[in-house]
Amino acid sequence: AATINRPLPGGQTLQYYKWYDLFFFGQDEWKVSRSFTLNYGLRYEVPGNTFNDLVPVNNRIVQAAGGDERYRFGPVPKRDTNNFQPRVGFNWNPRTGTGNPLGLLTGGDKFVLRGGYSRTYDYAFLNINLNIFSAFPFVASVPLPTITLPGGGRGAVNAFTSLPSIQPFGLDPLQLTRTIVGGDFRSPAADQFSLEIQRELARDLVFRVGYVGTKGTSLFQTIDGNPDAPNCNAAGFCSTSTQRVDPTIGIRRLRANAASSI
């Protein structure tokens, strides 16, 4: 028999989303002195929670299953409201005299030191929702009988015509593979740093050297939410395990804020 994915009773073939994003930003520049300028700003973002749109569909599925909580989608992360994004930068031209060692370095007013820091947040893409919606407890595999076709080979006849009358099958609903997100799922952050020295050497020649770095925090990563249980003997030899850490549930593809970069 062939298998095809079908929405569970109470579910739907297409999923619709509606959400609102809020963005606020303010920035200013302060000329502290003739030689020093400071700019600063703050951005605040409140991305919409697209996972909430999956809840009403799942509620109907649970109701169609007689209130069986094993069909419940979860966890459902709350809306991310902690996305404060400060930024600050400075520009310093010492404007020293030229008759001393420091003046040889700066050339009077030909030397500039500038730097900055900013934090930004990434946006959660809808592909994560698609992964959830295309797996249990929204979709399950159903069997379709196959026959020998006139031209040879085997296949399913009138598959989409017969599909509505075919019910999903499977083992314990908790044992079916699911894609889930962490209860604290949120927007990943990136901190950016920069520092630069600029020195005019001649009328048409400038020397510049600087550093720019970025550090990622709470980046998206797919991990095994229910990995194989350790299977090691007293001598420390480990072999492949046939049992998972939580044997009462099956495979869990967990989308979490578990990665970082620098």
Image (cartoon, helix red, strand yellow):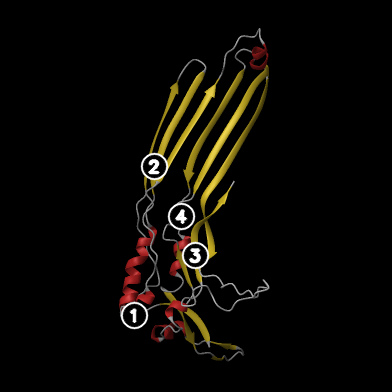
Q: Nearer the viewer, mark 3 or mark 2?
A: 3
| Upstream in sequence: badge 3 or badge 4 | 4
Question: What residue sits right under mark 2 in the picture?
Answer: 44
Q: Nearer the viewer, mark 1 or mark 3?
A: 3
- Provide residue 210's location: percent of width, then percent of height: 63, 31
| Upstream in sequence: badge 2 or badge 4 | 2
Question: What residue sits right under mark 4 in the picture?
Answer: 124
Kindly report the distance in space between the C-alpha atoms of the residues bearing marks 1 and 2.
42 Å
- Provide residue 127's location: percent of width, then percent of height: 48, 61
Figure check: 49 above or below 254: above
| Upstream in sequence: badge 3 or badge 2 | 2
Question: What residue sits right under mark 3 in the picture?
Answer: 254
Question: What residue sits right under mark 1 in the picture?
Answer: 65
Comparing 60 with 242, the one in front is 242
Q: Amino acid at mark 4?
A: Ala
Comparing 245 with 16, the one in front is 245
Residue that appears at 64% across and 16% down: 106
| Upstream in sequence: badge 1 or badge 2 | 2
Label 1 crowd (10 A; few <14 / some 14-19 / many >=20): some
Kindly report the distance in space between the C-alpha atoms of the residues bearing marks 3 and 4.
15 Å
Residue that appears at 54% across and 39% down: 192
Pick out the residue farthest to the top.
99
Label 3 crowd (10 A; few <14 / some 14-19 / many >=20): some
Secondary structure category for the residue under label 1: loop
Q: Are marks 3 and 2 in contact (CB under 8 Å)?
A: no
Q: Are marks 1 and 3 in contact (CB under 8 Å)?
A: no
- Provide residue 39's location: percent of width, then percent of height: 46, 28
Q: Which mark is residue 194?
A: none
Q: Amino acid at mark 2?
A: Tyr
| Upstream in sequence: badge 1 or badge 3 | 1
